[in-house]
Amino acid sequence: MGKDERLNTTGERPGQPGDPCVMVIFGASGDLTKRKLIPALYNLAKGDLLSREFAVVGVARSGMTIEAFRQKLSQEIRDFATAQVEAGLWEWLVQRLYYVPGDVGDPRTYQELRTLLAKVDKEHGTRGNYLYYLATSPSFFSEIVRQLGEAGLAREEDGRWRRVIIEKPFGRDLDSARSLNREISQTLTEGQIYRIDHYLGKETVQNILVFRFANGIFEPIWNRRYIDHVQITVAESVGVEKRGGYFDEAGTLRDMVPNHIFQLITLTAMEPPISFEANAVRDEQAKILHAIHALTPEEVLTHTVRGQYGEGSIGGERVPAYRAEPNVPPASNTETFVALKLSVDNWRWADVPFYLRTGKRTAKRVTEIAIQFKRAPLILFRKTPVEHLTPNRLVLHIQPDEGISLSFGAKVPGPLVRLGTVHMAFQYEDYFGTTPSTGYERLLYDCMTGDATLFQRADMVEAGWSVVAPLLDVWKALPPRSFPNYPAGSWGPKEADELLERDGRQWRRIEK
Ligand code: BG6
């Protein structure tokens, strides 16, 4: 692979490959494996970030041979690779793919797994380091960890490591998250547990910290003296696709808020960590979660909005109502849209509202964080119409058009003094081109090198659920009466607009 010759886009030498290890994927016949995990491993191999002492063992119920598993993934990589697949490199990876059919509740599965792992260790020099990836239904997480423990496959000794990546959702409320944490901690130490949130695999999300802390000019104004409010939008034009069964049990609040949206808030609001060591960063994130004011039942009524889409049209195409989606009950009261007003009760953010909105079947797919600065004292312009001048706004565009933009007032050329709002924009693509990525590369690599910075600690997950607990309680006690209350292809129910209008503010208009 010519490691030494390869340079990345910034002209630096690439990092060291991950540790020798076997990645064991539970739920290996599912979507995540073919869509994300295998293409991500391929990309890591291509970037020389995968150890040459590496192998994958898939575990799933389907009765497949190792050969059939290899063939299946060789077919699927064609559809899901993010870049051209080089035959030689793929063949290298294929020779390292293994499979164990079995039920994850059956101890015999783990005995077979143990035998195979010993053999793979010998053949590929993987040194007894195992990365378990739990890509199954969440109902099996605790059982798999327990069985791994009983089979002696979770014990770290003689310098070899055993790490477990756990997919979301991690619990469905505070109690279930606490129980899951308690159960897995019977077998694993916190240092072995990597709770994944794929938002932290996004370059633009990781860049929030770089933007804030590697530049001298933003941090001094990143506080209540200069910032009027923060708006976070995570809008998706897709509906629930084939996931109606899961989604109808979860709803948008559980699906998006305590995980993805809270990652965006904590990175935006946290204090500078004392280092980029995992716990230093996560301590600061956890402090923000603890500082988010817990809504009282009355505040839940006034500070939160829920919605469900009815039929409508997106990009000129008619799309069905949520209640008409496959596997969704026709009278479902599950929310597909949430808007919230939260406050972070600390010295930096007192009186700066954080408005959040997230929903499915919105007019456009867009994730962004908009920092709205306070209006300048415009007294100097008393003879000029300035009411329509937008105050300075910095927008971190997370996806799909990754970049950062700043709006400010400028003089419109001409003999009269007229002001207009203009934009300064940076686009990732212009500087760095596009890097083919599934978004899982960094997270897998970090786990292989033992860096847990981008993974959730037990206390963070629980703190996130604590914030949404009052909403879950009040919403359950008071079922919605007006669903569906926004048409597919809009920006959510009108109550979401009113949430800001009551404070004399507006959502940023996102152009179609
Ligand atoms: C998942 C949610 O975690 O994130 C989905 O379960 C959602 O409902 C998805 O669509 C959004 O991820 P992304 O990367 O497309 O913004």
Image (tube, rainbow, N blue to C red):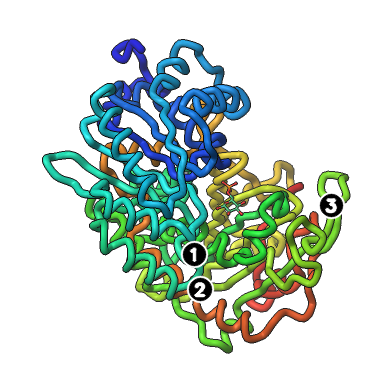
Whichever of labels 2 and 3 marks the residue nearer the N terminus, that label is 3
What amino acid type is highlighted by mark number 3?
Val
The residue shown at (30%, 48%) is 452
Task: Between residue 397 and residue 80, name the one nearer to us.
Answer: 80
Q: CA distance from mark 2 to mark 1?
A: 7 Å
- On screen, 358 above or below 134? below
What amino acid type is highlighted by mark number 2?
Val
- C-beta proximity under 8 Å, tags 2 and 1: yes
In the rendered view, does 189 fall on the left or right side of 337? Answer: left
- On screen, 330 above or below 16? below
Assign a secondary structure to mark 1: helix
- C-beta proximity under 8 Å, tags 2 and 3: no
Whichever of labels 1 and 3 marks the residue nearer the N terminus, that label is 1
Residue bearing the label numbered 3: 319
* Image quadrant in which the N terminus is located: top left
The residue shown at (40%, 76%) is 345
In the rendered view, does 18 fall on the left or right side of 444? Answer: left
Q: Which disc is residue 488 wearing?
A: none
Q: CA distance from mark 1 to mark 3?
A: 28 Å
- On screen, 311 above or below 55? below
Residue count near mark 1 (Cα–Cα under 10 Å), binned few <14, some 14–19, many ≥20: many
User: Is residue 203 something that shows in the picture?
Assistant: no
Q: Which disc is residue 468 wearing?
A: 2
Whichever of labels 2 and 1 marks the residue nearer the N terminus, that label is 1
Q: CA distance from mark 2 to mark 3?
A: 30 Å
Q: Position of residue 242 (x, y in %)?
A: 70, 50
In the rendered view, does 419 fall on the left or right side of 406? Answer: right
Residue count near mark 2 (Cα–Cα under 10 Å), binned few <14, some 14–19, many ≥20: some
Assign a secondary structure to mark 3: strand
- On screen, 470 above or below 289? below
Residue bearing the label numbered 1: 258
